[in-house]
Amino acid sequence: MEHDRSDEHNDALARLALARLGAAVRARRRVAGLSQEGLAERSDLHRNYVGGVERGERNVGYLNLLALARGLGCVPAVLVAEATPDASSETDAVG
């Protein structure tokens, strides 16, 4: 049973991390004045993929992270930093 709780906790952390990355992408896209379609074109990705990232439904691979950052005019580290909470708020959020 303890293993199940650990898996659930890890799943919750993963969902939270993807949602935060999606929020960072969305915020930067809006500041840049881009639609999802515009960001997709600049990133050479499909607009449905960009929407999925913003909704936290996609686990973004490294090459796609590079493409999104390029489309947003930033480096990937900026997106990751904006999506990374401090340790105390992450623990509070999931459990």
Image (cartoon, rainbow, N blue to C red):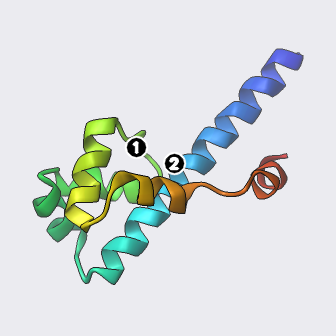
Query: Dot 1: what SS?
Result: loop
Q: Earlier in the sequence, mark 2 or mark 1?
A: 2
Numbered circle sitting on residue 58: 1
Residue at disc 2, secondary structure:
helix
Question: Label 2, on which residue?
Answer: 18
User: Is 14 on the left or on the right of 92, as rendered?
Assistant: left
Q: Is residue 6 left or right of residue 57?
A: right
Q: Where is residue 68 in the image (x, y as percent from the top left)?
A: 27, 55
Residue appearing at x 79%, y 20% in the figure = 4
Position above or below: 65 against 89: above
State how many labels appear. 2
Residue 46 picture location, percent across and down:
16, 51
Q: Residue 62's x, y, as percent?
A: 33, 37
Q: How far apart are marks 2 and 1 (CA)?
A: 7 Å
- Name the residue rendered at 39%, 63% in the picture: 25
Could you tell me the amino acid type at mark 2?
Answer: Leu
Question: To which quarter of the image does residue 54 belong?
Answer: bottom left
Density class for disc 2 (Cα within 10 Å; few <14, some 14-19, many ≥20) is many
The picture quadrant where one finds residue 85 is bottom right
Identify the residue at image location x=16%, y=56%: 43
2 and 1 marks in contact (CB < 8 Å): yes
